[in-house]
Every structure is written in structure tokens, then in C-alpha cells.
Image: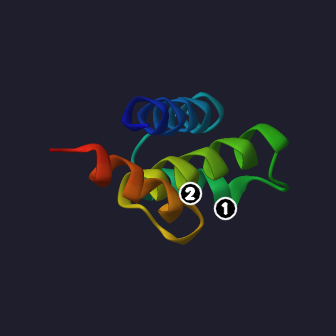
Amino acid sequence: LGALSSAILLYGISQVYGLLGTTRFDEMAIALASLDGMSPGLLLGIVMVIAGLGFKVAAVPFHMWAPDAYEGAP
């Protein structure tokens, strides 16, 4: 599960970087402000970043997977 969440997070980050051309938050804000509409690829990248982080911190829609990891651990 950790590898899957890392893969989702990293693919989302690479998608956002590929479409905006930066990884700095201040430059991302400028690039997003200059866009006239959000492309589906950028929206998918942002959703994947949020989903990957949600799996990592076991946030509400993804919290059902956390007990499996803790229950199987010695």
C-alpha cells in the first residue's frame, strides 16, 4: 500500500510539473493565475497528489486501509 500511494503521489507531482513547468508553490500560483481554464490533465494531477497524500496520512476516504497495515505488523 505504501508503494502504491507513493506511485500515485509521484505520478501526480510529475503530471503537475509537466503541465506547469515548476515545482515551487509561488511559481505554481502565478502559472495557475495566468491560465484561463484548468486542463483535465492538470486537474487529474492535482487529484492524484491529494489522493497520494491522503493514503500516506490515512485521511478519511482512505482511512479504511490503515488498520490492515497496523494489524499485520508484529
Q: CA distance from mark 2 to mark 1?
A: 5 Å
Residue position marked by numbered label 1 in the rendering = 33
Instruction: Please identify the quadrant where the C terminus is shown.
Output: top left
Amino acid type, label 1: Ala
| Helix, strand or loop for disc 2 | helix
Pick out the residue farthest to the bottom.
Answer: 60
Determine the image quadrant of residue 66. Answer: bottom left
Left or right: 2 with respect to 41?
A: left
| Helix, strand or loop for disc 1 | helix
Residue found 83% across the figure and 43% down from its top: 40
Amino acid type, label 2: Ile
Instruction: Please identify the quadrant where the N terminus is shown.
Output: top left
Q: Position of residue 44 (x, y in %)?
A: 72, 43
Residue found 38% across the figure and 58% down from its top: 67
Rendered view: 61 above or below 38: below
Residue found 55% across the figure and 55% down from its top: 50
Residue position marked by numbered label 2 in the rendering = 30
